[in-house]
Image: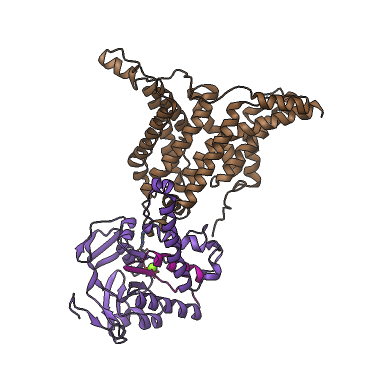
Chain colours: A brown, B purple
């Protein structure tokens, strides 16, 4: 096989894996959008906040230590423990559920029946609040996140492809793990929504609020539930991205990458989020590989947005989204 | 007319019990619009109660008050002899009051079966964790609920569309599915907002038969809004007549038919 083709294959595979990461973030958006019609701008910050909390709990960091020390003149920084990853993860899930509950109580509850744009603005406010809150709680330094996920080149794939094709593919173990976890997450979500009482109620709310109310579903319970799930998805995304590139505030920017994914896949479709993520992942890697050198590189910064723009023009509802028909 | 708690037998041999729901001096305003003006009436156990009146009279608003979608500014709602605190629609539903909507509110993306199944949500007891841990129990529950839903599907004669996504059904069938979903909750009180609007004669006859059968077989109390006078006179035991938010008549079909205020409202006699 010609080298060029092998390179392209490797790039495609890596693109698929990167796409899984995008899909994970997009998934959180879709969940909330389907259930409540809210485009949750804070989804990216939620991933950041979850990752910060996870690291903080794991390392026994004292929350709000800056504030506490400034007020009381103390020198608190660490509790002096190091929690096992699983304990810290469970603790973080609890924090994200609490966050969902607080958001419903303080924000959503008061905005029932408001225009989507108002809710959207509320989530922008929420995003900046949460970013500042995370900063105050855990500090703004870049943190290393390690929950024991394998990282680095996968030797087996490298060797096998080297023997079979004469060229060893570089695939990161972390990307492989992320793919498996994302697949499990989606399978879990599908089982949940198809076979449990709460999942059925969630689908009902996503379909029609009025009808859902009439069969005895509490919208507010469902909102707490769906924000909790989105918080969990954010945690998973936060773990993956955080392990890859450290927990830093630029993490919240991955939310911006989810936007073109959603435009591609449709805002209301879970399969859409997955496929959209994969297309963007592969697309931008291949584009950089094939066209990048001709235009001076760095196409990954804008390719996704241009692709999304093209989609907006020709298929505004996305690949899997519901067709938007205005009834006149 | 009748004693509040005493039951009596209708001409066609059905037993009607004491007062189940009582609306006392209900007033509902939307900004400057008074949709309901100081209306009182009751619904008795086991009866079919019709609410009629010209367009915009406030009929749907009244149904929305009963089902908790609207909260009246004034007045009291009494249910089973107890004064009801202001409630959310889902709380009302959990008390055994099911409803349909004038403009049909179905889960368009779900199949007929799944739509009716949502009516059973209140019967699904096992929580998230127990569902994950004890498949057996959850499965037994699921089977029981499925059986109840299948019975309703048979009853409403919609076996052939069980798996069809509701969004693809014609209007008349949608109304039928919506009734099915309300029935699935096994309600004590069933509220129907124009169950036959937009139907042809044959469909109306079917729907009338279903309503009568539900009332007869399960002794479900029914309050319904309907414009077709023939249907109203055939189905209902007692009728409330509304006009411009006010109650202008209340009684048996024969009584309201001969009520001058009602005749005037329907003939469009000018209001003073
Ligand atoms: N949510 C609402 N907001 C504002 N006004 C409302 C609302 N719901 C009803 N109204 C007003 O209340 C009045 C009564 O409306 P309602 O829908 O109860 O009438 P109706 O008797 O059901 O009429 P129809 O036979 O046309 O269904 C109307 O003037 C209507 O515009
Ligand atoms: Mg109406």
Q: Position of residue A268 (x, y in %)?
A: 53, 47
The residue under the point 44% across, 76% down is: B207
Of residues B35 and B233, the one drawn nearer to the viewer in this rendering? B233
State the residue in front, A154 or A324.
Answer: A154
Left or right, A36 with reference to A172: left
**The C terminus of chain A: image quadrant:** bottom right
Residue B258 sits in quarter: bottom left
Query: Residue B161, how many percent across, how many down?
Result: 55, 68
Q: Quadrant of the N terminus of chain A?
A: top right
User: Residue A65 magenta-drawn?
Assistant: no
**Is A211 above or below relative to A122?**
below
Q: Nearer the viewer, residue B77 or A76?
A: A76
Q: Is residue A222 visible?
A: no
Direction right: furthest residue: A2
Q: Where is B231 relative to B63, above or below? A: below
Vertical comparison of B271 with B133: above or below: below
Residue at (56, 63) in percent of width and height: B168
Q: Dividing the image into four equal quarters, which quarter contains ligand 2? A: bottom left
- Span highlighted in magenta in the image: B172-199
Please say if A258 is above or below A221.
above
Q: How many marks?
A: 0
Residue A67 image point, x, y percent = 31, 19
Residue A187 drawn at (x, y percent): 54, 44
Inspect this view and state whether residue A99 appears. Answer: yes
The answer to if B197 sits in the magenta stretch is: yes
């Amino acid at each position: 096989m010609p080298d060029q083709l092998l390179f392209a294959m490797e790039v495609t595979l890596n693109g698929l894996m990167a796409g899984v990461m995008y899909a994970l973030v997009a998934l959180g958006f879709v969940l909330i959008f389907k259930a409540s019609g809210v485009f949750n701008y804070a989804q990216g910050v939620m991933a950041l906040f979850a990752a910060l909390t996870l690291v903080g709990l794991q390392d026994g960091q004292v929350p709000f230590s800056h504030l506490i020390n400034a007020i009381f003149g103390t020198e608190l920084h660490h509790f002096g423990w190091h929690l096992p990853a699983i304990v810290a993860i469970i603790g973080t899930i609890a924090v994200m559920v609490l966050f969902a509950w607080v958001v419903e109580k303080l924000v959503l509850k008061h905005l029932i029946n408001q225009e989507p744009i108002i809710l959207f603005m509320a989530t922008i406010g929420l995003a900046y609040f949460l970013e500042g809150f995370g900063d105050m709680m855990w500090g703004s330094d870049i943190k290393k996140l390690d929950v024991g996920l394998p990282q680095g080149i996968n030797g087996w794939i490298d060797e096998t492809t080297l023997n079979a094709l004469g060229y060893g593919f570089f695939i990161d173990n972390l990307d492989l793990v992320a793919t498996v976890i994302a697949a499990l997450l989606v399978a879990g979500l599908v089982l949940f929504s198809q076979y449990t009482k709460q999942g059925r109620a969630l689908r009902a709310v996503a379909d029609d609020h009025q009808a859902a109310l009439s069969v005895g579903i509490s919208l507010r319970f469902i909102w707490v539930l769906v924000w909790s799930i989105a918080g969990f998805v954010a945690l998973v995304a936060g773990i993956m991205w955080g392990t890859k590139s450290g927990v830093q505030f630029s993490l919240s920017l991955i939310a911006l990458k989810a936007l073109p994914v959603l435009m591609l896949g449709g805002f209301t479709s879970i399969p859409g989020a997955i496929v959209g993520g994969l297309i963007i992942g592969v697309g931008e890697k291949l584009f950089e590989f094939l066209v990048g050198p001709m235009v001076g590189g760095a196409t990954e910064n804008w390719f996704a947005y241009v692709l999304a723009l093209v989609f907006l023009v020709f298929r505004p509802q996305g690949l899997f989204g519901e067709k938007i028909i205005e009834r006149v | 007319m009748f004693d509040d708690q005493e039951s009596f037998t209708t001409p066609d041999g059905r037993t009607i019990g004491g007062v189940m729901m009582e609306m006392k001096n209900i007033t509902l305003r939307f900004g400057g619009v008074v949709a309901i003006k100081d209306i009182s009436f009751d619904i008795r156990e086991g009866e079919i109660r019709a609410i009629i009146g010209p367009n915009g009279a406030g009929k749907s608003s009244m149904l929305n008050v009963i089902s908790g979608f609207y909260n009246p500014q004034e007045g009291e709602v009494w249910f089973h002899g107890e004064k009801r605190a202001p409630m959310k629609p889902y709380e009302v539903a959990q008390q055994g009051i099911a409803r349909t909507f004038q403009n049909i509110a179905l889960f368009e993306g779900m199949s007929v079966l799944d739509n009716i199944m949502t009516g059973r949500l209140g019967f699904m007891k096992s929580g998230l964790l127990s569902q994950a841990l004890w498949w057996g129990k959850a499965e037994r529950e699921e089977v029981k609920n499925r059986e109840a839903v299948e019975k309703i599907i048979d009853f409403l004669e919609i076996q052939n569309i069980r798996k069809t996504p509701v969004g693809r059904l014609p209007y008349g069938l949608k109304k039928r599915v919506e009734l099915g979903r309300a029935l699935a909750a096994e309600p004590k009180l069933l509220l129907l907002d124009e169950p036959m609007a937009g139907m042809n004669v044959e469909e109306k006859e079917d729907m009338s038969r279903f309503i009568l059968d539900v009332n007869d077989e399960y002794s479900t109390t029914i309050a319904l809004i309907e414009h077709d006078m023939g249907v109203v006179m055939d189905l209902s035991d007692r009728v409330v007549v509304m006009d411009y938010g006010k109650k202008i008549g209340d009684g048996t079909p024969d009584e309201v038919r001969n009520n001058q205020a009602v005749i005037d409202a329907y003939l469009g006699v000018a209001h003073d």
